Image (tube, coloured by chain):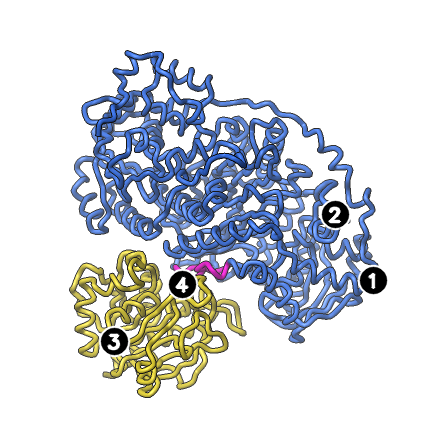
Chain colours: A yellow, B blue
Amino acid sequence: MKIGVVTFPGTLDDRDAARAVRLAGAEAVSLWHADTNLHSVDAVVLPGGFSFGDYLRCGAIAAQAPVMESIIDAANGGLPVLGICNGFQVLVESHLLPGGLIRNEHQHFICRDQKLIVENVDTAWTNGFKLGQEITIPLKNGEGGYIADAETLNRLEGEGLIAFRYSEVNPNGSVNNIAGLKNKKGNVVGLMPHPEHAVEPGFGPDTSAAMRSGVDGLTFFTSVINQLVNA
Amino acid sequence: MTTSVDTTKAAKKSPDKVQPYKELGLKLEEYEQIKKILDRRPTSAELAMYSVMWSEHCSYKSSKMYLRQFGEKVTPEMTKNLMVGMGENAGVVDIGEGWAVTFKVESHNHPSYIEPFQGAATGVGGIVRDILTMGARPIAVMDQLRFGAVSNPDTARVVHGVVSGISFYGNCLGLPNIGGETVFDKVYQGNPLVNALSVGALRHEDLKLAKATNPGDLVILFGARTGADGIGGVSVLASETFDADGPSRRPAVQVGDPFAEKVLIECCLELYAAQVVAGIQDLGGAGLSCATSELASNGQAGMRVQLKNVLLRDESLTPEEILMSESQERMMAIVPKESLKAFTAIVDKHEVEYSVLGEVIKEPRLYINWGDEEIVNVPPRSVAHDGPVYERPVLYPTWLDQLNRDSVISNNLRRATEASEIAEQIVQLVSSPNQASKSWITDQYDHYVGGNTALAMPDDSGMVRVSEETGLGVAISTDANGRYCQLDPYQGAKLALAEAYRNVAASGTVPAAVTNCLNFGSPENPEVMWQFKQATAGLADGCLELGIPVTGGNVSFYNQTGDVAIHPTPVVGVLGVIDDVARRVPSGWQDEGNNIYLLGTTRDELDGSVWAEVFHDHLGGKPPVVDLKAEKALAELLHGASLQGLVASAHDLSEGGLAQAVVESSLRFGMGARFWLNEITERDNVDLTAALFSESTARVIVSVGREDDVKFVGLCEARGIPVLRIGVTDQSGQLEIQDVATWNLSDLKNAHGSTIPELFG
């Protein structure tokens, strides 16, 4: 099982995403932004960071990178793709997911342990969760406010395309508390919080059981592996 | 372009040409010394180089004679793990298993007052490049901030700018911010302190040095293009006192692009891995002047450089400006000719621009040409290392005896007598700006990136894993107390060292090395110089006593507005090593039913304390006594206890005393606790105010599971550490101090947490 992790110039969480893939039991394959070759990976993670310095608009330049041509084609063909934070922004800029992400309502970068409600378990990346499950995933972004026009929002709500909603606190002013989305097929998922930072005891968010022991993020990666194994 | 260049030829022909050495920050005798070295007047390019390299910031001319003792007051035992000591870009410490770490703290005070956002941002950028230059992957940052009074309207401007600048740059670099300090005091009003620390990790064999040794090797400048930002920054900015009516100095502040730096980091690490660079130096203060002269001087070689090859952002720059520019995100590599192809393949992959400026020569001489004209011809050592050294006059401050006599006792400062008043004071103290939660600031920093953060704010120290295989890691804590240092700079520096040392020990690590950032007023003021002399002696003596070496540091003078200097503020960072970060100890209790022990003795020490500041707006007397033997014994005990898994949490007692510690430890995980203080007051013969607010050193509170009680107390007694059970944790959701008050943790959390957002949010 091989899962590709893309590195754009300015990507920051690629090594973390690769570690998460390994901890879940798959092989992590590094994909370079300038290379269209996907090296026959079974799934792709677009990790967080500030690709191309977030210049122009977050994710806008990365969406035009050669590797994205292949990823967009493959995603339309059903390849599982997970976009985390900046990766979510790239997915939106690539039109694999609708809407947009803007500066946090309070204007500050925010790093916090965020509670999320799993709204859809019918995806490659969430099938290991229970519907309505509350999970804790670190969030860290400056431009994580999700927006979409009324028509798109109606469609997202109506078709059940919302994968995660913020629970307790809406950290960035996202409409309808939207933290993450899925596409219709469920192979593409994007979210602002960082599941790759909640995969290893000792380095994740605090839980009531012990400090930094939260590993809710691991389920994203085991979900996709299970789906691929059972496919 | 019609501007004529000043050449070495012209310099010989026109010995009497009037030169602006004074405007560039050089004194007449320094200018004369340059003439003597060159046996002619300097060209304007040479003058530019000397002026920046001989500035206080780069040459350490006023501090050098005192900094030497960090290298002298050592034992062989202390330096046995030191792979690189002071003088390089950053010290390197062997931490075992083939790993080494390098860490350093540096100031960016002056730029951060003028342009807080860019000043703070480029401060992070600069220290990270220092770490990168040693061959290490930077793995974390911390920052030590001191601002003016919260009541002054200008403070918010500086706070917002500095915090966003650090957040912007550090987050975009992908380095976890694992801790730091934030202090407000009116003495920093016109002179905020913005210190930044970075730590990096490397395998022993990957160590790089800033050296140009082999003749024929190429001198390559790569990274961002050179522009007009930060010209003369070091000489004009960092080495002169601000004049309230002076001209705007904004053009001398550099502008940072963290994206470019992130790309540069990955590019450099790939260059190192491919072993294509023989030497490397970052471009920070003094830009090309520094990089060329230091590389050549360190390698006891010379260099021939064609300055026209420098890639520019602004084609109108003069040669002098190019030599002085402090444009960020640039590096200089020394590359063997046969490695050029491999070098260019890697920089091209990262789309980093580069240009070959020249080559290393055997003759220890630095030649710089502008086209066909020779504009620099100097011995590199005279620029980089043989700058002036001053023994500045020192004078015991005329006001100090009076200040020392003006104590809490002599003034008979009122102490609360009623339980209700003490209860109120506890809440007031933990919600005062300096003691309140800084999460409004630290929540703006990414502390997760990298996936190796084992401890971060609000724990006593930040800890990162270095080896994913074994869990080997390091913890760092930094401390400084300007109020103590004002009362006694010698003891004050030792107190900062003791606190940082205690903090890393409390987290379960073995203290291993020290870095410092010495923030002081003008060295031309003999009283300031006396403070500096005392503080450096205190720090060096303290390190010798604790047996841990200083591996490097930074001096920032001229932190004053007009004649008024800041409190002497020597920031001391201590690095500790832990064989497995899984064993780390947080600073708050997590489990119910644990016993809470106070280790150490409480004395009535309130001079210079938070209590004196918050309730009496008082600063006077003598700071707490430092007992480094007791600190060492305490650290060894904590390490032993942590190895045996006996302590569930440990929090050092320092500013705000026991009151601050019990509130913070309860709020860390929201676990309640009940305390009784009568045994402290009886055993140590102190009143309730002293028991709660005294800042006596060598004290820690720890929580211990019931099953480990006997073992733990036995360990303390065997080592002669005073130990007293003062409380127990519970699920009540409350903090109770018997005979004083009971609070809901949610109320305390609100009081402790709302101050900073209300002021700045």
- Examine the residues drawn in magenta and state their main secondary structure: loop
For marks 3 and 4 on the same chain, the one whose residue lies earlier in the sequence: 3
The x, y position of residue B199, in whole percent, is 43, 48
Q: Which residues are magenta?
A: B442-456
Farthest-out residue, bottom: A158
Q: What's the distance in space between the residues labelled 3 and 1, CA to CA?
A: 67 Å
Residue A124 image position (x, y, % from top left):
29, 80
- Look at the image and tell me whether residue B647 can be seen: no
The residue singled out by tag 2 in the image is: B605
- Near-viewer residue (B487 or B325): B325
Circles 2 and 3: CB distance less than 8 Å?
A: no
Q: Is residue B696 above or below residue B84?
A: below
Q: Is residue A22 left or right of residue B407?
A: left
* Secondary structure under the numbered disc 1 in the rendered image: loop
In the rendered view, tell whether residue B324 sits above or below residue B650.
above
Query: Nearer the viewer's eye, disc 2 or disc 4?
Result: 4
Q: Which residue is mark 3?
A: A80
- Where does label 1 land, which residue? B418
- Residue B549: x percent and y percent? 52, 39
Tell me the chain of label 3. Answer: A
Distance (Cα) linking label 2 and label 3 = 63 Å
Numbered-mark total: 4
